[in-house]
Amino acid sequence: MVFEKVRQILAEHKGIEPESITMESTFESLGLDSLDTVELLMQFEDEFGVTLQADDSLRNVGDFVKLIEGSK
């Protein structure tokens, strides 16, 4: 469920098909830069009602999903 919401938000943010996003998709492969990452982090916080801390360990979609799930 978390992955589905994260995937939808990412797809809307980048204007790409949700089906092209997997847990292993890297931010680089999705064309995300550091500003995108910060904007998405804030959007995830609003969507999921959690507080998230960005760090260098966030490398792919699965890392975001795990971070969100661990913050609930």
Image (spheres, helix red, strand yellow):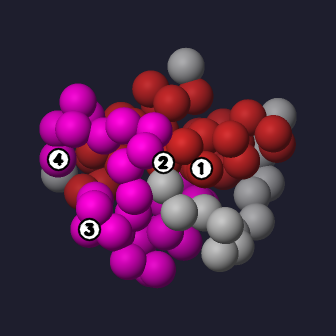
Is disc 3 surrounded by few (<14), some (14 to 19) or many (20+) residues within 10 Å? few
Is disc 1 surrounded by few (<14), some (14 to 19) or many (20+) residues within 10 Å? many
Q: For the C terminus, which image quadrant?
A: top right
How far apart are labels 1 and 2 at the CA level? 5 Å
How far apart are labels 2 and 3 at the CA level? 12 Å
Magenta stretch encompasses residue 35 = yes
How far apart are labels 4 and 2 at the CA level? 14 Å
Evaluate if marks 1 and 2 touch, with contact meaning CB atoms under 8 Å apart. yes
Dot 4: element:
loop
| Residue ID for mark 3 | 31
Mark 2 belongs to which amino acid?
Answer: Val
Choose mark 4 or mark 2, whichever is in front: 2
Relative to 52, say whether 3 is above or below.
Answer: above
How far apart are labels 4 and 1 at the CA level? 18 Å
Span shown in magenta = 16-43
Residue 41 on image: x %, y % = 58, 60
